[in-house]
Amino acid sequence: MIKKTLYITLIFLFYTVILFAKININTATKEELMTLKGIGQVKAEAIIKYREQYGGFRTIEELINVKGIGEKTIENIKKDIIIK
């Protein structure tokens, strides 16, 4: 019984971390970027292309330079992303 409770607790903690962890847009994979609201495959690929071309993002607001990313998208995802 204790093992089962511990197992359930660990699963809960794992998913809580995933749900509330911020995504570093300078290192995120396409799949990770696609978990952000309003970011599909095309926008995720554009973010990766931009960061490879320009050496990464220095600010969240720099996302405005990515094709297909506008102010509304930035507003929707800025609480879920970080720059490192």
Image: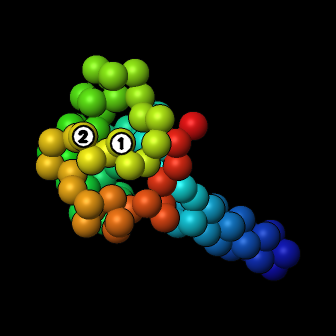
**Residue 67 spot, x, y in % from top left:** 15, 42
**Residue 78 spot, x, y in % from top left:** 43, 60
Q: Is residue 40 left or right of residue 36?
A: left
Q: Is residue 38 left or right of residue 80?
A: left
View extreme (right): residue: 2
Does dot 1 land on a helix, a strand or a loop? helix
35 or 77, nearer to the observer: 77
Residue 41 visible in image = no
Q: Is residue 55 left or right of residue 46?
A: right
* Residue 82 to residue 6: above or below: above
Residue ID at (35%, 66%): 75
Amino acid type at image mark 2: Asn
Quarter holding residue 46? top left
Quarter holding residue 66? top left
Residue linked to disc 2: 65
Q: How many marks?
A: 2
Are the residues tagged 1 and 2 within 8 Å (C-beta)? Answer: yes
Residue ID at (52%, 49%): 82
Q: CA distance from mark 1 to mark 2?
A: 6 Å
Residue ID at (73%, 72%): 9
Residue linked to disc 1: 62
**Residue 32 spot, x, y in % from top left:** 39, 48
* Residue 74 to residue 66: above or below: below
Can you tell which mark lies on residue 7? none
Amino acid type at image mark 1: Glu
Does dot 2 land on a helix, a strand or a loop? helix
Residue 22 visible in image = yes
Specify the quadrant that holds the C terminus.
Answer: top right
